[in-house]
Amino acid sequence: MKLELTFDGGMKRLIFISLLLILLLLLPHVHALQMLSDDQVSIDSPIDDDVFATGGTVTINAPVTSAVIAGGTVIINAPVSGDVFVAGGQILVNSDIKGKIVAAGGDIDLRGAAENAVIAGGDIDIHSTTVINRDAVITGGNVSNAGKILGNLTVRADKFLNTGSAGSIDFEKTEGLRGLRNLINIFSILMTAGFLIVGIILLKLFPRQFFIVESEIRKSPVKNTLVGFVLIIASVIVITLLSLTIVGFPIALIMGMLFIIALMLSSIFVSFAVGRKIVDLFKVKLKFKPKFNDLLIFVLGFVILSLLFRIPYAGVLIVIIAVSLGFGAIIYALRENWQNITT
């Protein structure tokens, strides 16, 4: 049985739009950003600012500070003085990037220089004009390197052709890992469906308690993320120490169960916040009954967040942020609204 998760061009645009929205949740006062969206987007004049662009075809022909791009075809023909995050069906990088490049797509051609590179795709070609000043991590079907990697080159691919150079090369053929990966994918999909059902049940049966926690997420996202991360680590330490004593073991068992439940529920509350952010940002008007509108917002945010969790490498960071944000919000909501939540 073979199960693969694939994204078309539209889905990739949605994923990266949503990733930006999570960043906006954490940095609600950021305004220094040029947002461009159309079927054909062409940047022909220098932009001394960060650029976020989506479209059927996105072409950068003039220098920009940094860029987050999602499109069917993405072409970078001008220098970027910062980082580039890009997703698309076909990605062509023909100019230098002073920061790092993180790219995911079908066909990816890299001809310019960069500081670091994290690339995932179907067919990936690193041409002879490419110089990566530090490390490169590449995951793909067919990978070809003719460039110069000054640091470590890590490759996970079905096929790998290396005619270039690297400080060190770590190559592993992915073909033998597919069976295990498919089982993990099946388990992950079933778990995701289970969490979706749990979220719908919570929203239907305990709407007031649900929205108390969700409003805490939107009110203080940065504070909740930092506090949540610290409290997760502290909770693990306390529960572990208690479990080492006979007297403390029952307490550790109860605390551990509550801790696991809070962790499992944390991303559910963040899902609704992400869905609400999408609806507000794009000014989507839902004309159903309020309860059904809330359900649609939750499902939208849940699907987006689940897809973000599956982005190679970056997905791990997104999971940590989402769980910490939700956990911190749960703790603050319990502390400040204990009477309202329990009545």
Image (cartoon, rainbow, N blue to C red):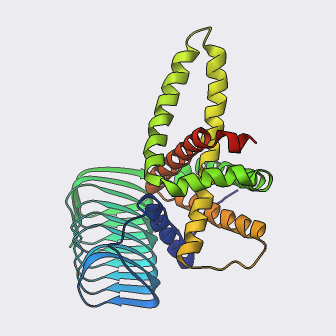
| Residue that sits furthest to the front in the current view | 339
Residue 265 visible: yes
| Residue that sits furthest to the top in the current view | 246
Q: How many marks?
A: 0
Percent x, y of residue 159: 43, 61
Residue 185 visible: no
Residue at 22% across, 77% down = 79
User: In the figure, 58 relative to 271: above or below?
Assistant: below
Residue at 55% across, 67% down = 277
Name the quadrant of the C terminus: top right
Residue at 34% across, 63% down = 161
User: In the figure, 298 relative to 48: above or below?
Assistant: above
Percent x, y of residue 165: 22, 59
Residue at 43% across, 75% down = 107
Percent x, y of residue 339: 69, 40
User: In the figure, 321 relative to 250: above or below?
Assistant: below
Q: Quadrant of residue 242?
A: top right
Percent x, y of residue 112: 24, 73
Name the quadrant of the N terminus: bottom right
**211 or 128, which lies in front?**
211
Q: Quadrant of residue 74?
A: bottom left
**281 or 148, which lies in front?**
281
**288 or 168, which lies in front?**
288
The reply, left or right, for residue 36 in relation to residue 342 is: left
